[in-house]
Image (cartoon, rainbow, N blue to C red):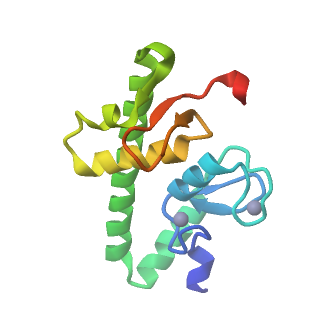
Amino acid sequence: MHDEDFCCAVCLDFFIEPCIIKCGHSFCHLCIESHLNITEKCPLCRAFPGNPIKNRQLESLTMSYISFRNLSTSYYERMKSNRKKLVLQQKALLIIYTELSDKPGQSTELHNLVKNVQDEELKSEIRRQVRQQVGIGLEHIGDLEGDTVTIRLKSSSSK
Ligand SMILES: [Zn+2]
Ligand SMILES: [Zn+2]
C-alpha cells in the first residue's frame, strides 16, 4: 500500500469525505464540488462526471490506512479546517444570491455585498466566490479585482 492510493488527485492529500463520479474516479467532496463549479469534467480523465456519490468504502479504507500510518491527528485537523471552509463557502454563496435576488434588476456592486460583513474571512470568501461564480450563475461589469464592479445574476438567455 502506498500513500498515493489514498490521495485525491486534486489536493494531492488524503481523501476527505471521498466521492466517486461516473467514470470511477474519486476525489474529496470539497475538491470535486469546487472543480465541477468550474468545469463539468473529471479532473483526471475529463469524462462527464455526473453527480458525485459518497464513496464510503474508500473513506473507511483511507481512515484505516491513516491510523495504520499514525497520521490521524493531522488528518482530523485538516478535516476540521475543510469543514470550516465548506461552511464559509456556503455562507458566502447565500449572501451573494440572497442579496442579488432581492435587488431590482438583480444586480449590485461588489462592495454592497461585503460592507455589512464583519468577519474578514467571510469577506474574502465572498470576493473569491464572486470570481468563481462569474460565468456560472453571475455576470459582471467592470474590473473584477476592484470594488466598483457590478455583478448580477446571469440571464438564462445569454447562456
Ligand atoms: Zn482533495
Ligand atoms: Zn475520471
Query: Relative to residue 105, is residue 63 depicted above or below?
Result: below
Q: Is residue 7 left or right of residue 106?
A: right
Q: Quadrant of residue 25?
A: bottom right
Q: Residue furthest left?
A: 118
User: Going 78% across and 64% down the picture, which residue do you hit?
Assistant: 45
The quadrant the N terminus occupies is bottom right
Q: Is residue 75 left or right of residue 138?
A: left
Query: Relative to residue 84, is residue 104 depicted above or below?
Result: above
Task: Give how far across and how far down residue 42 sits, in percent.
Answer: 72, 58
User: Going 62% across and 70% down the picture, which residue do you hit?
Assistant: 9
Quadrant of the displayed image that contains ligand 2:
bottom right
Task: Give how far across and how far down residue 102 sits, in percent.
Answer: 41, 16
How many numbered discs sit on the rendered protein?
0
Q: Which sits in the foreground, 95 or 80?
A: 95
Q: Which sits in the foreground, 47 or 96?
A: 96
Q: Residue furthest top?
A: 104
Task: Give how far across and how far down residue 108 sits, in percent.
Answer: 42, 27
Q: Is residue 86 left or right of residue 36?
A: left
User: Going 38% across and 24% down the picture, which residue do you hit?
Assistant: 99
Query: Relative to residue 56, is residue 62 depicted above or below?
Result: below
User: Going 33% across and 50% down the picture, which residue do you hit?
Assistant: 124
The quadrant the C terminus occupies is top right
Q: Which sits in the foreground, 61 or 132?
A: 132
